[in-house]
Amino acid sequence: MSAGTNKIAVTVTDIIEVNQLVKRFKFERTGGGDLPVFSGGAHTVVEMLDKEITRLNPYSIMSDPMDQNAYTISVRRDDKGRGGSLFMHHQVRVGDEMVISYPVNLFALDLRAKKHLMIAGGIGITPFLAQIKQLTTLQYHFELHYSVRNNTVGSYVDELTSFYPKNTHIYYSDDGQSIDLEQLLDGQPLGTHVYICGPKDMITWVYETAESMGWPREVIHYEEFLAPQSGKPFEVLLEQSNKTIQVGEHQSLLEAMEAADVDAPYLCRGGACGQCETNVISSEGQFIHRDHWLDDEQRKSGKKIMPCVSRFEGKSLVLDR
Amino acid sequence: MSIQFKKETFRNDYTFKNSQWAIDRFPFPFHEDSYMYSVNMEQHQGGPAGSVFEKRFDVDEHYLAEMEDRALVLAEDPLRCQSLPHMTLAGWDLLELIMVSKSEDYPDLFQLHREGNNWRWINKPMKIDDQFVFMDETTLPYGPMEYITRQTQGDFAVLDQRDDNLWMDAGMVTTQADWSLDFDIGMNFFEWHAPVPKAHEMGIFVRALKFLLNIQQGSPARRLNWTMTVNPLLDTSPENYHKWGVEKSTLTVENVGEKQHLRVELQTFFRLPRSNALVFPIRCYLIRLEELVTVPKWGRRLHRIIRDLPEELATYKGFISNRPMIQEYLSGFDDGQPTSDGIWPD
Ligand code: FES
């Protein structure tokens, strides 16, 4: 199967500054026509043609899954990142044509749940916005606990509290407010599923707390996309394609393969889905594993790498790709 | 061409037959002279004009007869159609997928008119003209999955995806090659595949599951599978083995060409948009050996496949006892000439 998913040509029809950190982008199909409906929690991979670099960044689709006129995404500016969010913030204008992927859902609702308990931190709110719209249409029961620094940078706090006052609970960390997690989890009816999207610490905290309180794994759902990080440049031999490629300081291994026209599979580009898993034929050096996919044993074996986020330092690396 | 729907039966007097049109477009599953079990998936994005791969949901001359047979099976055994409560949304997804696909692919046979959630569905061959409210079950005579699959050829397994696995949580299964929805409902991928010999060791199922979990919206996939059936019987279910199992012993040298059928499943896989479930339509095509050998390449090749098939596969596919007779019959159509690559007639 070829890399990624089917593509859709879209035009940026609106850009809204949500607050000093976050901008919202609206995409409509170029030349008109419906976009596919999707399921709440899905993301799309946005292609950015940034001079000679093609960036592919995943963003949760936050608009109503049943709305086929447009998709919206929210992009938080990351001044220290590798440039994808800066490109979206500074280069993209209304009227620009872009290419996005079909929606892919790696953070789906479990529709067997009697109640959907959502825990969001910061920009992690975006997949929940689509899920909440879907759950509202289906008349399912949900409750949102959303932690932000303060009202000025709390994206969509006002909309949520005015549309869903009974279901929404906001916590301002600047004011010392925080979720009383144990009490919250303790009071849930049987059949509740918990969903977490936010910073890594938050996910770990909720996951571990819930597990220690006896919640089964199948009812704890989370999504964390890592952004690939910069690192020392390195060289890789791709045996199947018979190519030697250089991975630049600000490039991921996956991006370097794509730049060399190697058809490498991916879905999330954030170390979560497992799709890019690649066999190592030989290596002399140190892996820098950053994904959530491989287990400790696989890491120790030195036989696998996830090129979307992980890197390598050392003398030589040969991959089965 | 417009399709001439046939009046025929898949039980009792077995009047099922293929026209020359249906023979020529039969999905012959062997691309070379030997057969190895494999997952052999490809994209389901059209195919040669007129072939069964061309449309998303193929409609052929057996449509009305197959739908009648389905209604008979359901009347006898309503448990052939089941949907766990959380799968209703997937049912609507499936209804939409089929209605949109069929109305676009066969505008002379099917029409869909939509104004918001007020839908009108016209199925001309079945003389259906229904108005209903999308996502409102009370406006349809059956649940959405049952409603649309009573009008669509093939079995349907609707799989929920969670915990990195697939769960058989809904389905319409009346033309199955020896498996039971009522037995498999609620099972995960490994549980419902448990009886397959050998392949498990080959790690094939792990790879197949990984492939299926990653099928995305807008990128459906397909593969072919095959077996052998005596008489054109659609419903070869375990529930009814006592009825059809004995038919295997009615095969004779004289009637093998007429009674023995190659049974091919066109299996497709679509990600459903709202529910994130996966639908797995399994479409069954039957061809009697005497029809099949009218294509010389297929006669030669099927003879070699049947002759060389490993014992345990012939057992698994349920024709080990009749293999000598089938082989003998087919040998009369194999002159030893080489065959060309690929599944199509020369
Ligand atoms: S693309 Fe998902 S883990 Fe690498």
Image (cartoon, coloured by chain):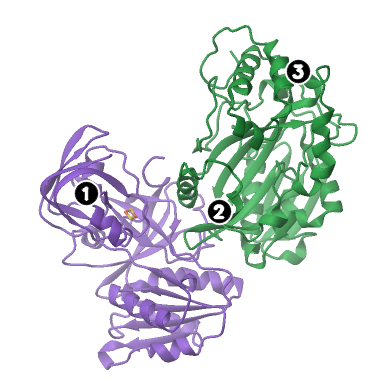
Chain colours: A purple, B green
Task: Return the residue at label 3.
Answer: B290
Q: Amino acid at mark 2?
A: Phe
Q: Are marks 3 and 2 on the same chain?
A: yes
Spatial CA distance of label 3 from label 2 is 37 Å
- Label disc, if present, on residue B189 of the rendered structure: 2
Q: Amino acid at mark 1?
A: Leu
Spatial CA distance of label 3 from label 1 is 56 Å
Helix, strand or loop under label 2? helix
Task: Return the residue at label 1.
Answer: A253
Q: Amino acid at mark 3?
A: Glu
Q: Are marks 3 and 1 on the same chain?
A: no
Q: Is mark 2 within 8 Å of ligand 1?
A: no
Direction from residue B290 to residue A8 in the image, left or right: left
Residue A318 appears anywhere in the view = yes
Give the quadrant of residue B166: bottom right
The residue that appears at 43% across and 84% down in the rendered structure is A213
Q: Which percent across, then down, holds residue B174?
A: 75, 46
Residue B68 appears anywhere in the view = no
Q: Is mark 1 within 8 Å of ligand 1?
A: no
Q: Which percent across, then down, holds residue A289?
A: 22, 58
